[in-house]
Each structure stands twice: as C-alpha cells, then as structure tokens.
Image (cartoon, rainbow, N blue to C red):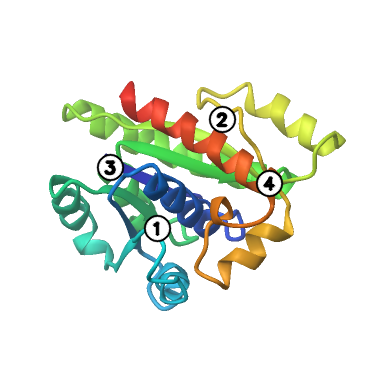
Amino acid sequence: MIIGVINTKGGSAKTTTSTNLAVAFAHKGYQVCLLDTDEGQESTRMWVENRDEALPEIRVEVVLPKFLATTAKALEQEGYLVIVDSAPKLSDLANLIIVSSDLLIIPVQPTYYDFRGFENFLENFRAFKGAKEASGGKVVPSVLLTRTRPNTLMLESIKEALANYEVPLFKTEIVEREAYKATASMGLGVVEYSDKKAKAEMLKLTEEVESLIENF
C-alpha cells in the first residue's frame, strides 16, 4: 500500500503526520518506508538520523520526483507500507503523488487560508484522480485536521465547510501539542512519548488509516 501525505500549502503538518504514522504502524508490526520528496529540505531524513537504533526501524529514502512512482512501487512489492511525505508545492510532484498513491491523507489546519489552499488543491486532485481511474487505477483521499484547538469557532466552521466536499474527514484530529514538536527533534513518534493524549489520538488515527487499507 502506498500512502501519500499531501497538501500544497506549507505548514500543514505533513512531515509530522508522516513520521508519526510511520512509527505507529511500525509498532503494529508493519515494515514501513518513508519517502522524502522535499529535495533540499529532507526533513524526514534528518528526523530518522536522530532515531535510536533500539526502536522499531523506519526506513527512509530521499527520492527525486522522476523516480517516485517506480521507487514506491518497488518498495511496496518488497512488502513495505510506503508513506510519501510531500513538498509544499503545487507542481508536477503533487500530481505524481496523486497518481502514485493508493490512499491520500490531506492535512489541513483549521484556518481560512489553509481551507482556501485545500480548495485549490482539490481542483487539481479531481483532474488527476479522473485520469488515474480512466486507466483502471484507484486513489482514496481523506482530510485530516491538524494543529487544532478544540471547541473553537474556527474549527467548527472549517468542519462544516469541509462537509460540503466529496473528500471525507477523519474522525481523529491532531491537536496542537508540544509533544509533536518535542518528538520531532528526537526521531520519535508520539506513541513512544510520555504525552498520553497525543499517543491516544495518533493510535486512533492509525486505526482509521488501517481500516482504509483493509477496505481498499
């Protein structure tokens, strides 16, 4: 299975989502490979370099866009759950991730500007989803609300707005927590950290993603 974590707007917690899902799935016994497509930044590679070798292994590969599809498919055939961490650009890379992935996770912060960015991305997604389906493929997208502050008016407004689109919303939300910042510099996922609330929400998200995998 190939999972693309994608949003063309920066700061939407793509790498945070990718690394934490990778760790949670590794603890469930999956072989996981993260593909880092952000050439020059390589945040995922830097994250894994800080990871303790005694923890479940997360394989990380930095991949150029032209090799993304073939690399992801080869890793999948080796038995890996492949998670693609995308760069924040509306470009050919975003289109390649759409057509190369089975599942898409679209992290969106509950702000006006992020919502508008999601709308812009969605127009592009529809076109490439149609092209993939025309060739016999399939891609299943879901929106993940990230960096949320519970019980705020903006959060509820964004939820209502997202309900008008064809892309379903994960039940789990990733709340703004210090745990996500702290673990990023240590090569950890929050399921390996002391914040019980962060661990619980990431495990719930992992269960939702695993259900999508099983029902793909």
In front of the other: 163 or 131: 163
Indicate which disc, 3 or 4, sits on the residue closer to the N terminus: 3
What is the x, y in percent for residue 82? 29, 49
Question: Which residue type carries mark 4?
Answer: Lys
The picture quadrant where one finds residue 86 is bottom left
Q: How far apart are marks 3 and 2 (CA)?
A: 21 Å
The residue to which callout 3 is attached is 99
Q: Residue at x 62, y 39 (%)?
A: 201
Q: Residue at x 78, y 31 (%)?
A: 157
Label 3 residue SS: helix
The residue to which callout 4 is attached is 196
Question: Which residue type carries mark 1?
Answer: Ser
Q: Residues within 10 Å of mark 2 (few under 14, many from 20)?
A: some
Indicate which disc, 1 or 2, sits on the residue closer to the N terminus: 1
The residue to which callout 2 is attached is 170
Q: Which of marks 3 and 4 is in front?
A: 4
Question: Which residue type carries mark 2?
Answer: Phe
Q: Is residue 109 visible?
A: no
In the image, is 111 to the left or to the right of 54?
right
Label 1 residue SS: loop
The residue to which callout 1 is attached is 91
In the image, is 138 to the left or to the right of 49?
left
Q: How crowded is mark 3: few (under 14 residues within 10 Å), some or many (20 or more)?
A: many
Label 4 residue SS: helix
Indicate which disc, 1 or 3, sits on the residue closer to the N terminus: 1
Q: Residue at x 39, y 67 (%)?
A: 54
Question: Which residue type carries mark 3?
Answer: Val
Q: CB of mark 3 within 8 Å of CB of mark 4?
A: no
